[in-house]
Amino acid sequence: MKLDLSELIKSPGAIIPYHFEEEIEVDGVELLEPVVADFKFSNTNRSIIIEGEFYTSIMAECVRCLEHFKMPLKSAFREAYTRQDLALDAKGNLITDDEDIRSIFEGHILDLTELLRQNIILALPVAPLCSPDCKGLCPICGKNLNEGECQCNKQRIDPRWRKLLNYKKKEV
Ligand SMILES: [Zn+2]
Ligand SMILES: [Zn+2]
């Protein structure tokens, strides 16, 4: 999805809201729903501001139990560009050699899909958890401890330590 921002860039004070809903492909990420995003483009005279917030969901892998699960992904971002950032040469091409700007702008045409793709990557969780209290896998037998205890789990705790563990629990 590409959006021509030339009118906005020519009109100080202008504000353009924009609703986006589309399937997007992102390398290395499995998106489970179309990306829904709301944008606000504004020209404050000094700069062109792009504000956006998006929602989608991804297939994530829990770092503790390695199960795949559907994880909601949402984020908001704000980017500002000066007149110089978006200045064009006589042929209508961007003068700037800023790669970040060039990756989403071609002249004054904004590539919304690419902008969202970049922000989806930034919003990806570093260490996804299927639930905050995921018990993970038993390091000995590999059983997913969310599905129940395994036998080695009990044997692993030395009886001498067990006393200490109980003691600690009481203290808390
Ligand atoms: Zn998990
Ligand atoms: Zn085990």
Image (cartoon, grey):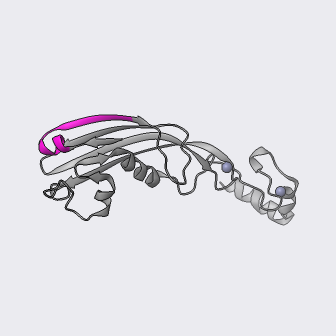
Residue 57 at x, y percent in the picture? 53, 41
Q: Answer left or right for 170 relative to 25.
A: right
Can you say whether 54 is above or below 106 in the image? above
Quadrant into which the C terminus falls: bottom right
- Identify the residue at image location x=28%, y=52%: 105
For this rendering, which residue is in front, 89 or 155? Answer: 89
- Identify the residue at image location x=20%, y=48%: 48
Observer able to see residue 134: no
- Identify the residue at image location x=78%, y=44%: 147
Residue 54 at x, y percent in the picture? 41, 41
Residue 55 at x, y percent in the picture? 45, 39
- Identify the residue at image location x=30%, y=44%: 51
Quadrant into which the N terminus falls: top left
The image quadrant that residue 122 belongs to is bottom left
Q: Answer left or right for 80 relative to 169.
A: left
Can you say whether 143 is above or below 5 in the image? below
Q: Residue furthest front?
A: 91
18 inside magenta stretch: yes
Residue 155 at x, y percent in the picture? 87, 60
Which region is colored magenta? 6-20
Q: Answer left or right for 107 relative to 163.
A: left
For this rendering, which residue is in front, 5 or 123? Answer: 5
For this rendering, which residue is in front, 152 or 71? Answer: 71
Q: Answer left or right for 127 relative to 166.
A: left
24 inside magenta stretch: no
Can you say whether 73 is above or below 124 in the image? above
The image quadrant that residue 75 belongs to is top left
For this rendering, which residue is in front, 36 or 3? Answer: 3
Observer able to see residue 15: yes
